[in-house]
């Protein structure tokens, strides 16, 4: 019964996506009709992914052949031929899949997905979100990871290899003792739905994926994906990204994303932190403009260290609040050309400054300027100044960096990491090398999409079960469940490794 329900949900995803008929129209018409239709092929790929099987065509064939006989006849796995019933063969699966991959690939491969392939990936992931129930959120966490191809790398002589669209990439070792290394394959990016700021929890479904060769820069390659989301009527509010995205040129990432109406919440690269010049005398730092008399120690304030104590957190937040008092506050919003106006913090009552006599009447608990500039710059002589879009174009974001509000909001970005953890789990879907033994961008991207569709269905089911359990406990007067978090530091791992057996 559960298998029938799972097949029904997977078929709903395929039908909601509407890609089977679209792909079918792209395939050549043979002398005799193909027994395996594209709709059945996609259902078989989703069945294999839902069972945690590797992305092998033999696994797809086995998944279809293991269905009940009546389902096989309905899907065309068993068809009536002249000499009687004929069961689908592996060669037929291989043939149909090769036709689909060839139709969705570019005529001249360049490591980037074709327009047709991108449309299929978008439709499949969006259909899975619709079937699972779209979460009430417009916030998204983005990230990229390595996706290694099964092909051997090209030899040193420069000859072609089995996967000409793959390229050499770099991946960071995040575990203790794990070093950075290079790999041969693709970069995989996800756009994961996260909860709104101060909003209720939502199912962290992957709404879009993007795959390209490692010689294609990931952040600029993700911008068209977000643009297609907005064009289809999907609201894009907060976009949470790490410093790998924030460090790109503004024209490649920050400016195009802001033009979509999104608010960036991202970590800053160490090279982009601190003072980065001036604008009309105001100091440009951490994506904002600050009073020219701001203490240098405050401008050098970095993000809170992981595992900080309560005392360290309180001290850091106090410095962040003092830094915010020196910030030139917004006076107007952004106009269509990206210009906006900001005002002197002393004129706005956040700071005591002798250049603003009215501010000296403020309470002495407010920060004060001890040594104002001898020759006041424009930002001190005027009440407000105009900020063009090129000022802090790369580093400007929704919250002051690194304030507590930024820290709490940015913490939602870990949803993207959890999305990768669920598809790199040896107990279910593991997209490490060997997971897919086909080469080329189109075959790998199609199988990756089916894995994330299966992952969305699994995550949505688990989230609904947790919400139902929380409602049951609340109705019974029981306290909410508490999740146990076990955290081991690098010192613990080193001590355990050196401990006697």
Image (tube, rainbow, N blue to C red):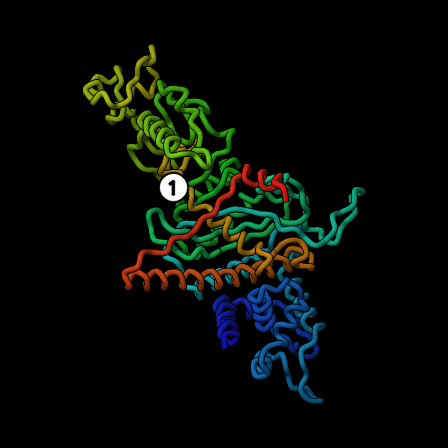
* Residue 401 can be seen, yes or no: no
User: In this figure, which residue is indicated by the disc labeled 1?
Assistant: 408
Q: Report x, y in % for residue 146.
A: 61, 48
Judged from this view, the residue extending furthest toward the bottom is 83
Relative to 251, 403 lies left or right:
left
Label count reads 1
Judged from this view, the residue extending furthest toward the front is 500
Residue shown at 48%/53% (left/top)?
228
Residue shown at 63%/53% (left/top)?
432
| SS at badge 1 | helix
Q: Is residue 261 above or below residue 206?
A: above
Residue shown at 69%/79% (left/top)?
32
Q: Is residue 71 above or below residue 481?
A: below
Foreground of the two, 405 or 264: 405
* Dot 1 alpha-carbon crowd within 10 angstroms: few under 14, some 14 to 19, many 20 or more: few
Q: Is residue 437 above or below residue 356?
A: below
Foreground of the two, 362 or 279: 362
| Location of residue 90 (image quadrant) | bottom right
In the rendered image, the quadrant that contains the C terminus is top right
Q: Report x, y in % for residue 477.
A: 27, 60
């Amino acid at each position: 019964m559960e298998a029938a329900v799972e097949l029904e949900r997977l078929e709903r995803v395929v039908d909601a996506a509407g890609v089977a008929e679209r792909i079918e129209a792209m395939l050549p018409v043979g002398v005799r009709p193909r027994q395996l239709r594209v709709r059945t092929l996609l259902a078989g790929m989703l069945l294999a992914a839902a069972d945690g099987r590797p992305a092998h065509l033999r696994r797809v064939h086995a998944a279809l052949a293991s269905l009940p006989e009546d389902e096989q006849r309905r899907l065309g796995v068993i068809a009536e031929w002249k000499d009687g019933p004929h069961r689908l063969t592996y060669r037929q699966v291989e043939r149909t899949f090769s036709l689909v991959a060839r139709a969705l690939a570019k005529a001249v491969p360049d490591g980037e997905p074709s327009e047709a392939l991108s449309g299929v990936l978008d439709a499949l992931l969006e259909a899975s979100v619709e079937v699972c129930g779209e979460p009430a959120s417009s916030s998204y966490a983005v990230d990229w990871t390595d996706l290694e191809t099964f092909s051997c790398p090209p030899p040193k002589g420069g000859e072609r290899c089995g996967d000409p669209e793959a390229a050499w990439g770099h991946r960071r070792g995040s575990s203790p003792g794990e070093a950075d290394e290079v790999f041969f394959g693709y970069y995989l990016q996800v756009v994961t739905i996260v909860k709104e700021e101060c909003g209720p929890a939502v199912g962290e479904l992957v709404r879009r994926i993007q795959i390209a060769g490692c010689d294609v820069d990931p952040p600029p390659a993700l911008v068209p994906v977000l643009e297609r989301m907005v064009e289809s009527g999907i609201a894009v509010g907060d976009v949470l990204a790490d410093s790998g995205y924030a460090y790109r040129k503004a024209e490649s990432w920050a400016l195009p994303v802001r033009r979509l109406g999104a608010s960036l919440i991202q970590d800053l690269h160490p090279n982009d932190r601190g003072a980065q010049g001036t604008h009309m005398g105001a100091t440009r730092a951490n994506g904002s403009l600050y009073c020219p008399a701001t203490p240098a120690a405050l401008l050098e304030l970095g993000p809170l260290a992981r595992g900080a104590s309560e005392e360290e957190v309180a001290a850091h937040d106090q410095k962040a609040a003092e830094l915010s008092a020196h910030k030139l506050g917004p006076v107007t919003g952004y106009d269509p050309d990206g210009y906006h106006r900001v005002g002197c913090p002393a004129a706005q009552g956040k700071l005591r400054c002798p250049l603003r006599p009215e501010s000296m009447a403020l309470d002495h608990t407010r920060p004060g300027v001890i040594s104002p500039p001898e020759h006041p710059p424009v930002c001190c002589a005027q009440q407000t100044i105009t900020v063009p879009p090129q000022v802090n174009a790369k580093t400007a974001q929704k919250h002051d960096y690194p304030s507590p509000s930024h820290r709490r909001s940015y913490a939602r970005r870990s949803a993207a990491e959890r999305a990768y953890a669920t598809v790199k789990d040896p107990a279910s879907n593991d997209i490490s090398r060997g997971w897919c033994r086909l080469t080329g961008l189109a075959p790998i991207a199609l199988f990756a999409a089916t894995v994330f569709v299966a992952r969305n269905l699994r995550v949505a089911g688990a989230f609904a079960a947790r919400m139902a359990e929380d409602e049951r406990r609340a109705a019974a007067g029981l306290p909410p469940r508490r999740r146990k978090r076990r955290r081991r530091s690098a010192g613990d791992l080193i001590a355990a490794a050196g401990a006697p057996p």
